[in-house]
Amino acid sequence: MNVQSLVLDLHRIGCIQFGRFRLKSGLISPIYLDLRLLISEPRLLQAFADALAGLIRGDEGRPALTFDRLAAIPYAALPIGVALALTLDRPLIYPRRETKPYGTERPIEGHFQAGERVLLLDDLITQGESKLEAIATLERAGLVVEDVVVLVDREQGGKATLAQRGYRLHSLLRLGEMLDLLAEAGAITPDQRDEVRRWAVRSP
């Protein structure tokens, strides 16, 4: 499945919405990306896992990423991480968003050894703070993080934030590219595309 088909399918199932949406930061956004809906679309979820696997393996002349385990950030990236782990036949762990005050009280679920290199996975990146929080949890456990992979880069500073801390970001899709593809296919108007672009440039 090509990139345009993936983007159009995301729009078709409601993962890409246009309107007025309040983000976690409090900002009002003209676009909302809800990739959690992929869990209800197994074929599309697998298509994204296949595309991510190609990115990670270094298909089309890109350098392959080296790692021992995948680490998916809850909650949106967990089903993506499971699909990708099955596709690549690689083990998966995940850093908990909160440590349980009972049972094992583990901050990281799954088997791993200190010193292993993990490839961090999330659905999207905006400014990068949640990635740094997950990386800190993994590094406290003795794991090594060098690369972060996301389905969508919203192109609002996340890549630079990670680079400043020595981490490399790899994205399957970029917001600007997605907007162009949707406009070319007639799924959105040029005015909608331009409004989102102006907002993304203005927003911190």
Image (cartoon, helix red, strand yellow):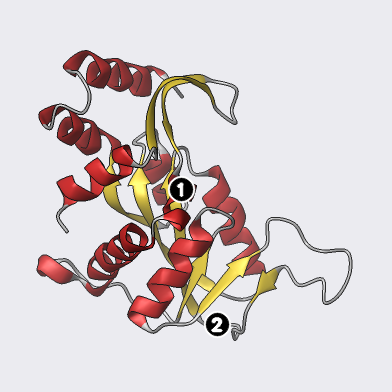
| Secondary-structure class at tag 2 | loop
Residue 120 visible, this orientation:
no
The three-letter amino acid code for the residue at tag 2 is Gly
Residue 202 visible, this orientation:
yes
Question: Which residue occupies the foreground of this view, 151 or 161?
Answer: 151
The x and y percentages for residue 150 are 38, 54
What's the residue at 24%, 21% (across, down)?
193
The three-letter amino acid code for the residue at tag 1 is Leu
Q: Image quadrant for the N terminus?
A: bottom left
Where does label 1 land, which residue? 37
The x and y percentages for residue 196 are 32, 21
The x and y percentages for residue 113 are 59, 86
- Left or right side of 153 for 61: left
- Looking at the image, the residue that sits furthest to the right is 102
Q: Is residue 6 above or below residue 42?
A: above
Picture quadrant of residue 48: bottom left
| Secondary-structure class at tag 1 | helix
Where does label 2 land, which residue? 115
- How far is mark 1 from mark 2, CA to CA? 34 Å
What's the residue at 30%, 39% (across, down)?
12
Q: Nearer the viewer, mark 1 or mark 2?
A: 1
Q: Is residue 171 above or below residue 8?
A: below
